[in-house]
């Protein structure tokens, strides 16, 4: 890999909500994202949610006072902008040392591609998954 391509993969990736009150930076290379088709992700995003798991130490959030956290289950909370409503984070604070960051919230090219579809047993009946990527029922 050339130095330019290596630098592009490891430079900080920036993102924000729709109104810009919440922004974030991720340092280091992004892990390949998953596409979650569970009912909760579909309701939160309006379709399925694609996110990448980022080590907490690599994630810097600006405007955190505008994030509302919704405890969607006993182990997971979901963060969204309290002003514009954009879904930004999926966070299992007690069980993992990472936060899921919505791929659609990144402002620049991410240099990654979906790796797997998860919770496909709960996918909507209005679409098919035809990209040939692995699919997990749960």
Image (spheres, rainbow, N blue to C red):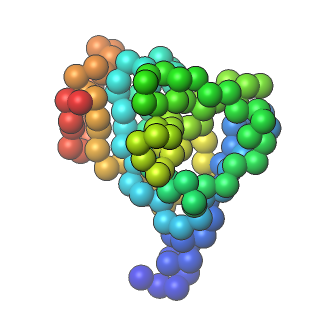
Give the image quarter of residue 32: bottom left
Q: Where is residue 13 drawn, in percent x and y?
A: 61, 59
Q: Residue at x 78, y 36 (%)?
A: 65
Give the image quarter of residue 38: top left
Vertical arrangement, residue 79 with respect to residue 60, above or below:
above
The N terminus, quarter of image: bottom left
Front residue of 96 and 81 = 96
Asked whether the viewer can see residue 34, the reply is yes
Q: Where is residue 44 drawn, in percent x and y?
A: 51, 22
Vertical arrangement, residue 99 with respect to residue 7, above or below:
above
Front residue of 83 and 8 = 83
8 on left or right of 121: right
- Name the outermost residue toward the top: 125
The C terminus, quarter of image: top left
Front residue of 86 and 3 = 86
Q: Which residue is drawn at 24% across and 44% down?
A: 133
Give the image quarter of residue 35: top left
Q: Where is residue 99 drawn, in percent x and y?
A: 51, 46
Q: Residue at x 31, y 50 (%)?
A: 115
Asked whether the viewer can see residue 42, the reply is no
- Name the outermost residue toward the bottom: 3
49 on left or right of 60: left
Q: Where is residue 17 drawn, in percent x and y?
A: 69, 37
Q: Which residue is drawn at 28% across and 20% down?
A: 122
């Amino acid at each position: 890999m050339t130095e330019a391509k290596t630098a592009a993969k490891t430079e900080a990736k920036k993102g924000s909500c729709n109104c810009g009150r919440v922004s974030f930076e991720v340092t280091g290379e992004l892990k390949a994202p998953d596409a979650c088709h569970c009912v909760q992700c579909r309701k939160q995003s309006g379709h399925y949610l694609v996110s990448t798991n980022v080590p907490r130490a690599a994630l810097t959030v600006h405007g955190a006072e505008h994030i509302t956290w919704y405890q969607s289950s006993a182990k997971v909370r979901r963060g969204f902008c309290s002003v514009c409503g954009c879904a930004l984070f999926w966070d299992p604070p007690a069980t993992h040392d990472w936060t899921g960051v919505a791929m659609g919230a990144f402002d620049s090219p991410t240099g990654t591609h979906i790796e797997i579809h998860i919770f496909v047993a709960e996918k909507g009946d209005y679409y098919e998954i035809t990209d040939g990527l692995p699919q997990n029922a749960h």
